[in-house]
Amino acid sequence: MTQHCGLVAVLGAPNAGKSTLVNALVGQKVAIVSAKAQTTRARLMGIALEGETQIILADTPGLFAPKRRLDRAMVNAAWEGAVEADAILLVVDGRKKKRDYLAPILESLKDRPERKILVLNKVDETAKEPLLVAAQDLAGDGQFSEVFFVSALTGDGVPELKTRLAALMPEGPWHYPEDQVSDASERLLACEITREQLYRQLHDELPYDSVVRPESYTTRKDGSVEIHQQIVIARDSQKGIVLGKGGTKLKAIGEAARKELADLLGTKVHLFLHVKVDERWSEDKEIYEELGLDWVR
Ligand SMILES: Nc1nc2c(ncn2[C@@H]2O[C@H](COP(=O)(O)OP(=O)(O)OP(=O)(O)O)[C@@H](O)[C@H]2O)c(=O)[nH]1
């Protein structure tokens, strides 16, 4: 059978469930998910397989009005992900009754020539009637060729969406080997996993101006992996939050991240986390490059 391969850009407001959807389509965790808005910083790709078709998913940062430089870089990355895609998915939180916040996204999508598919997510927590109203409301202007109702969380409707996306992918050789699920290097993916644990375990206490950087990533003789990472925060006063009493918080974060990494990499993992205070990290070009973001003024 001939191979098919194409790019799908996944767009949507922060917290719509884009990362969860990409993970569900890939069938394995590739993008980090958290209840906090704007979790997705780097442009991670998920790679889904359906028969002879490879679907490359650009999991883009949520689109929102950018103020800080980091935010502007994220929005730029989001649009980059959508350029010349074979399909654009707009993921919308179906539970939300108010939809004005989507107006700028809908407006900017108007000029895009790609096929656009509306995905109303979180159907597990939404009644049918309001979902239909939302679909009519958003797809009424004819901009979307199709509407899918899914729950990225439970997987409801996801296989149907995946089948449809596969059918839209053009003929062509696969871009990635069969067993690859993400184009993020393992180093970077490992940082994302630590960052997710930071979010999970510190909740609202975690300062937004923090970042996890890779220091080193080596395979030991016995096949296990030794990973060193730096948690960079902007203020000395934030150190206590990350470390916790007697360092217990950081230990728990490292332990959870290590377990998950071992699971993902299928080998024993030694994870070392170092906390560093750097007031000016958000002005550091190198950090942006590391995270796969463009430096924008
Ligand atoms: N009930 C329900 N919750 C969902 C569903 N999909 C995602 N969520 C939750 O919504 C929150 C946001 O999900 P993410 O996948 O991180 O959202 P995102 O759009 O990638 O967010 P950003 O990274 O901020 O752009 C998480 O708490 C998810 O568990 C769903 O189908 N049903």
Image (cartoon, rainbow, N blue to C red):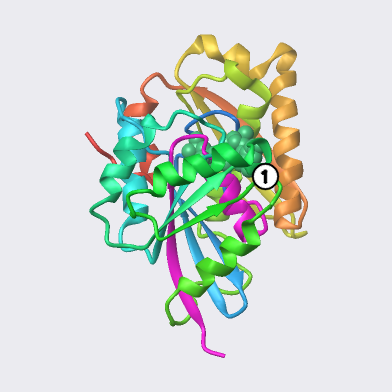
Asked whether 276 or 136 is in front, the reply is 136
- Residue at figure coordinates x 52%, y 9% from the top left: 237
Q: Is residue 222 above or below residue 71?
A: below
**Vertically, is 258 above or below 224?**
above
Where residue 262 appears, as percent x and y from the top left, is 75, 50
Q: Residue at x 63, y 21 (%)?
A: 203
Q: Is residue 139 visible?
A: yes
Query: Which corner quadrant of the image does residue 297 belong to?
Result: top left
**Along the horizontal axis of the image, is 289 left or right of 226?**
left
Vertical relation: 87 (above or below) 197: below
Image coords of residue 73 (percent x, y) = 32, 38
Looking at the rendered image, the quarter that the N terminus falls into is bottom right
Q: Quadrant of residue 293?
A: top left
Report x, y in % for residue 17.
55, 41
Residue 250 sits in which quadrant? top right
Instruction: Tell me which image quadrant ligand 1 sits in.
Output: top right
Query: How many numbered markers are drawn?
Result: 1
Residue 194 appears in the figure: no
Residue 178 is a magenta residue: no
Mark 1: C-beta under 8 Å from nearest atom of ligand 1? yes
- Residue closer to the observer: 66 or 254: 66
Q: Is residue 102 above or below residue 111?
A: above
Image spot of residue 33 (x, y percent): 60, 39
| Residue type at the position of mark 1 | Leu
Label 1 sits on a secondary structure element that is: loop
Residue shown at 52%/31% (left/top)? 96
Give the residue number, with chain letter if any, for mark 1: 153
Q: Residue at x 75, y 34 (%)?
A: 255
The residue segment tinted magenta is 1-29
